[in-house]
Amino acid sequence: MNSENPIAIFDSGVGSLSIIKEIRNALPRENYIYLADKKHFPYGKKTHTELLRIVQNTIDYLSENFKPKLIVLASNTPSIQVLHEIEKTDAEIVGVFPPIGEAITASKTGHIAILATQNTVKSVELEEYIQSQKVPSTVKITKFNASGMVELVETGDFLSNKEKSRQVISEEFSRLDEIDSLVDTITLSSTHLPFLNEYFTTMKPALHLIDPAKIVAKKVTKLLEGNFQNTTQKGTLEILVSQEKQSLETIIRKLGIQEEIREICLDF
Ligand code: DGL
């Protein structure tokens, strides 16, 4: 595999962009394929079996068509629930996971919440992941269903309907407050959530927001170090969407991304 092979990155929609931004900052000369799999949105409401089938097929599709040197599964939902069941490919696959250690360090109250999608918060895999992190017994972790907020991002409402967005987020924060009013730190454990940061900081200025994007970028950089890192050219970004090209286009143009978008057909 040569250094010009791309890095493929995907999620159910615009979520990946929060991860791509950090990876491109770290590795601007690489070539990127970004697949927004809107056809299968929301990953967070799929069963385990459905999610595994979708993600395995997507990885096979990317491997066959683009021969990526690295695949970034820029989505917490499948990273947590099914990544360990994905068949090995030529390319290493990097996932995204709740940065629990960072959250514990940032928290003063020792009460943190993992904001993730509906079926992720219910999954045994998230519970197992938390157990594997050796959380001190003084720390309290709440698993919080943030699928309602994820939808604000994927529909574009966070840009076009600020009133609705504020209302939904305010209701979600009240619900979190009822579960544990001492939470002072949240992990953004859907890659859609960082797009709501402005709302979060305005509505809850004291809340610590822990985003794993930089951790993923560091991991990718490390994996490519002295290996396949492309240093010879200006990097490119190719954007693919599996459905609703117009809707993706409206959002990403507003976010200042100018590259062309190509609609592809995923027949699974
Ligand atoms: N952005 C995704 C995540 O990090 C999933 C959102 C969804 O499709 O439900 O979990």
Image (cartoon, rainbow, N blue to C red):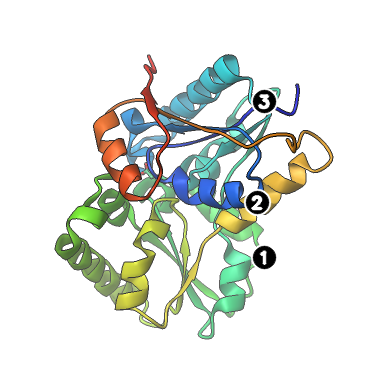
Q: Secondary structure at mark 3?
A: loop
The one of 26 and 182 positioned closer to us in this rendering: 26
The three-letter code of the residue at mark 3 reads: Asn
Q: Where on the picture, by quarter, is residue 166?
A: bottom left
Q: Secondary structure at mark 2?
A: helix
Q: Where on the picture, by quarter, is residue 243?
A: top left
**Residue 239 locus on image (x, y percent):** 44, 31
The three-letter code of the residue at mark 1 reads: Lys
Mark 1 lies on residue: 134
**Residue 25 locus on image (x, y percent):** 60, 52
Splitting the image into four quadrants, where does ligand 1 fall? top left
Q: Quadrant of the C terminus?
A: top left
User: Residue at coordinates 58% horizontally, 80% vertically from top-left?
Assistant: 138
Whole-number angstrom distance, CA of label 2 to CA of label 3? 17 Å
User: Residue at coordinates 77% horizontally, 33% vertically from top-left?
Assistant: 228
Q: Secondary structure at mark 1?
A: loop
Instruction: Assess whether mark 3 and mark 2 are in contact (beta carbons under 8 angstroms).
Output: no
Task: Give the vertical position of 224 relative to 177 (above or below).
Answer: above
Relative placement, left or right, of 236 versus 179 is right
Instruction: Assess whether mark 1 and mark 3 are in contact (beta carbons under 8 angstroms).
Output: no
Relative placement, left or right, of 160 versus 43 is left
Looking at mark 3, is its residue's CB closer than 8 Å to ligand 1? no
| Circle number at residue 5 | 3
| Circle number at residue 26 | 2
Q: Quadrant of the N terminus?
A: top right
The three-letter code of the residue at mark 2 reads: Ala
Whole-number angstrom distance, CA of label 2 to CA of label 1? 30 Å
Task: Give the vertical position of 253 relative to 54 (above or below).
Answer: below
Closer to the chain start, of discs 3 and 1, is 3
Query: Quick check: can you spot residue 152?
Result: yes
| Circle number at residue 228 | none
